[in-house]
Amino acid sequence: MARYEYTPAFEDIHTWTTGGQGNVWLNNYVRLGVTASSNDSGTDGNSLRGADLTLLKSTDSWVKLQTGRSDGLDSSSFYSTDGGFAFTNYNTNTFTNASARLKSAAS
């Protein structure tokens, strides 16, 4: 499997993606983190938002809770049945108003 990515030129500011990630220790036992990304390229725009919380009891004992949400397609999806010589586009109507959510916990 291979993933190919197209990068547009800088002429259109609306094709840029903005985002960031940060975290802060609230005290010696609690860390809070956030992540955000946005790409406003018309109908193909997408966004990602997430947060995580780490609770630390000791260096060997901790719990991390995460949640996230994404909306829209990151890019068009193509597939190849001949090793990459020709590509076929998936039906983009299948992904209209696509969104995903994640919730996880680890220790």
Image (spheres, helix red, strand yellow):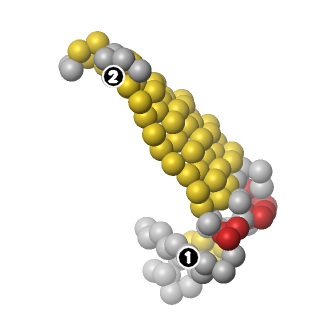
Taking depth in this image into account, of 26 and 98 the one nearest to the observer is 26
Residue 106 in the image: state x and y as whole percent.
38, 25
- Give the SS element for disc 2: loop
Mark 2 and mark 1 lie on one chain; the one further toward the N terminus is: 1
Q: Residue at x 68, y 48 (%)?
A: 71
Compared with 22, 57 (above or below) is above
Q: Look at the numbered discs 2 and 1 and tell me whether their residues touch, using CB distance below 8 Å.
A: no
Quadrant of the rendered image containing residue 9: bottom right
Identified by mark 2, the residue type is: Ser
Q: Residue at x 62, y 66 (%)?
A: 16
Mark 2, residue position: 107
Residue 40 in the image: state x and y as whole percent.
71, 60
- Give the SS element for disc 1: loop
Asked whether residue 105 appears in the rendered view, the answer is: no
Quadrant of the rendered image containing residue 68: top right
Identified by mark 1, the residue type is: Tyr
Asked whether residue 14 appears in the rendered view, the answer is: yes
How many numbered circles does the render carry? 2
Q: Residue at x 60, y 46 (%)?
A: 48
Mark 1, residue position: 6
Residue 73 in the image: state x and y as whole percent.
66, 58
2 sits left or right of 67 in the view: left
Compared with 91, 49 (above or below) is above
